Image (cartoon, rainbow, N blue to C red):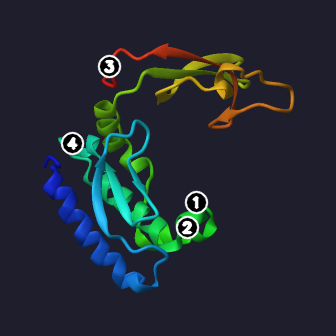
Amino acid sequence: MLIDWPYIERAFAEITANVDLLCPLDQWSIQPLKLSATQHKTKYGMADVNGVIYINQAFVGTSAVALLDATIRHELAHLCVGLQHGHDSCFKAIAKKFGANFGRHLKQETAQVHVVIGHKYLLFATIENKALNTTTEILFRRVHRKHAKYLDYKPGRFRYLTIKGQKVLNFRYVESLNNHSG
């Protein structure tokens, strides 16, 4: 089943009714008033102070139903607690209550949406496996812009990043071949 905009609107209405049973809308910091589309390059969804929930149009044409569900629930949780909470413990408790479950089980669905969004760069990390005395380069993430955190990364003896418990030695950016971002 491929997602279209009417599907997103129905899902929004159904999920809003569902979370209203968990925490009545009249108790929310911001009332959800409207659903709108966005073409944001890094976000699946957003919520604003006017009660508008924005869903990325990159969902349209994909089968990322569970990711869409989690995104809507996540954005509704922001409205429930208030945007000032960001992703603090108060927000996380409501997001969990609402069932905004992003996890590894959505990996295939996130890949579908990321292909539609397009990314300008691939960020690779070289990691060290001390036990085997080897290094491996892995795709760390797809990104839209280069970030100083990775461009200027210099691991120290006691200060370094890890991926799955392995020390990151360096990062490098490569321009993405399937960049649809124009």
User: Which SS class for mark 4?
Assistant: loop
User: Between residues 17 and 34, which one lies in front from this camera angle?
Assistant: 34
Q: Residues within 10 Å of mark 3 (few under 14, many from 20)?
A: few
In the rendered structure, which disc, 3 or 1, sits on the residue that comes first in sequence?
1
In the rendered structure, which disc, 2 or 3, sits on the residue that comes first in sequence?
2
Q: Residue at x 37, y 56 (%)?
A: 71
Q: Which residue is outermost to the front?
A: 50
Separation of residues labelled 2 and 3 (CA atoms): 35 Å
**Amino acid at the residue labelled 2:** Phe
Q: Residue at x 38, y 47 (%)?
A: 44
Q: Which mark is residue 86?
A: 1
Q: Marks 1 and 2: CB-CB under 8 Å?
A: yes
- In the picture provided, is 4 more to the left or to the right than 103? left
Residue at the spot of label 2? 91
| Mark 3 or 1, closer to the camera | 1
In the rendered structure, which disc, 3 or 4, sits on the residue that comes first in sequence?
4
| Mark 2 or 4, closer to the camera | 2
Separation of residues labelled 3 and 4 (CA atoms): 17 Å
How many marks the image carries: the answer is 4
User: Which SS class for mark 1?
Assistant: loop
In the rendered structure, which disc, 2 or 4, sits on the residue that comes first in sequence?
4
- In the picture provided, is 85 more to the left or to the right than 101? right
Q: Which mark is residue 62?
A: 4
Residue at the spot of label 3? 178
Q: Residue at x 26, y 48 (%)?
A: 64
**Amino acid at the residue labelled 3:** Asn
User: Is the C terminus in the top left, top right, bottom left or bottom right quadrant?
Assistant: top left
Residue 90 falls in image quadrant: bottom right
Q: Residues within 10 Å of mark 4 (few under 14, many from 20)?
A: some
The answer to whether residue 70 is seen in the rendering is: yes
